[in-house]
Image (spheres, grey):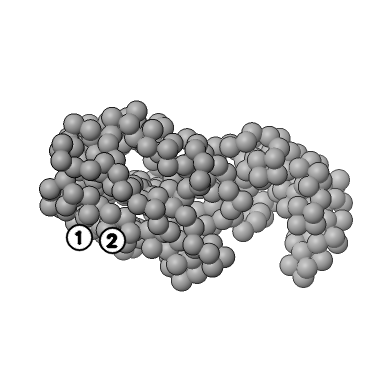
Amino acid sequence: MSDSGPLFVSSGDLIADRRYKWALDHAGRGDFAGAADILVQTVELAPAFATAWFALGAIRDRLGDAGGAIAAFERAERLDPDDYHGARLQLARLGAGEAIPAMTQTYVRRLFDQYAARYDSALIEHLAYRGPRLLRQAVESAARRVGRPPRFGAMLDLGCGTGLAGATFRPLVDRLIGIDLSSAMIAQAQQKRIYDRLITADFIEALGTELVEGARFDLVIAADVFVYVNDLAPIIANVARILAADGMFAFTVETHAGDGVKLLPTLRYAHGEAYVRRLLVEAGLAVTQLDQASVRSEKGMPVGSLIVVAQPSTAMPTTASSGR
């Protein structure tokens, strides 16, 4: 899922707010040049109006004015340290600023709070999302590979969202816990009544706190979640710490042909296979299964992804194959 554009945040000046909305009306009718002119007037009237600066950057980018877009996004970033709209991501996409910046909690929370009510239909009906089904198949296959039944006591669903993956895995687990940063997504998951416990928190932070401290999980999953995380090292290390001795860690990532991490034009991160394998080894995990597949589509085209299942290295039987 990518960001559709700026949400309205008032400048505190009614005239500037009206001009901003007028500009968006022009943009909605395809008059981007007119919208840009009105936004220039808007930020002259309200120089600290970060939302208007961000919109000006987006429209200048649409007009092919990369330099003007960068200048506007830089102003939005300076005015909004929490990066509510994701200006730093737009700057990275345009080749300015930090190459692979992390997404702020404020940005991610806003993005998913915005989409929560229509998240399921958007993914399944429009993006052909099949990540949970493919991830469950990989877990069941990996379990057979190491000679254990595909049944798990406690499962942790990282970035559980509305519960699409939780619903898919519920028949395999006795206890299901979900963590998500977005309270609106958690509210959608609660309505499905499939989780034993739901936690509204940043799961990266929660992995190292009392929310899961002392617990051991037989299965930890992250379905279409790591596309919003640039650095996977602390997550993988913390998951390894809370896995049961014979537990499994299953996740998906979008990928690319090279190594390391790449910010895609969709403002999602892609992680190279060698990078993923390296972090798993460093965390004391061994790859039980790794498949290349497409978990979703983008503009009708399949998105290259990895489906990964790993276990603590000490749990791997010597006869098990580590890889595809």
Image coordinates for residue 272, horizontal then vertical, percent: 47, 42
**Which residue position is annotated with label 1?**
171
Q: Is residue 81 visible?
A: yes
Amino acid on which disc 1 is placed: Pro
Image coordinates for residue 262, horizontal then vertical, percent: 55, 42
Q: Residue at x 66, y 45 (%)?
A: 93
Q: Which mark is residue 168?
A: 2
Amino acid on which disc 2 is placed: Thr
Q: Say left or right for 189 vs 93.
A: left
Mark 2: few, some, or many residues within 10 Å (few <14, many ≥20)? some
Q: Residue at x 57, y 65 (%)?
A: 299
- The answer to whether 163 is drawn above or below residue 43 in the figure is below
> Helix or strand or loop: what does disc 1 sit on?
helix
> Helix or strand or loop: what does disc 2 sit on?
helix
Image coordinates for residue 100, horizontal then vertical, percent: 58, 37
Q: Residue at x 38, y 63 (%)?
A: 130
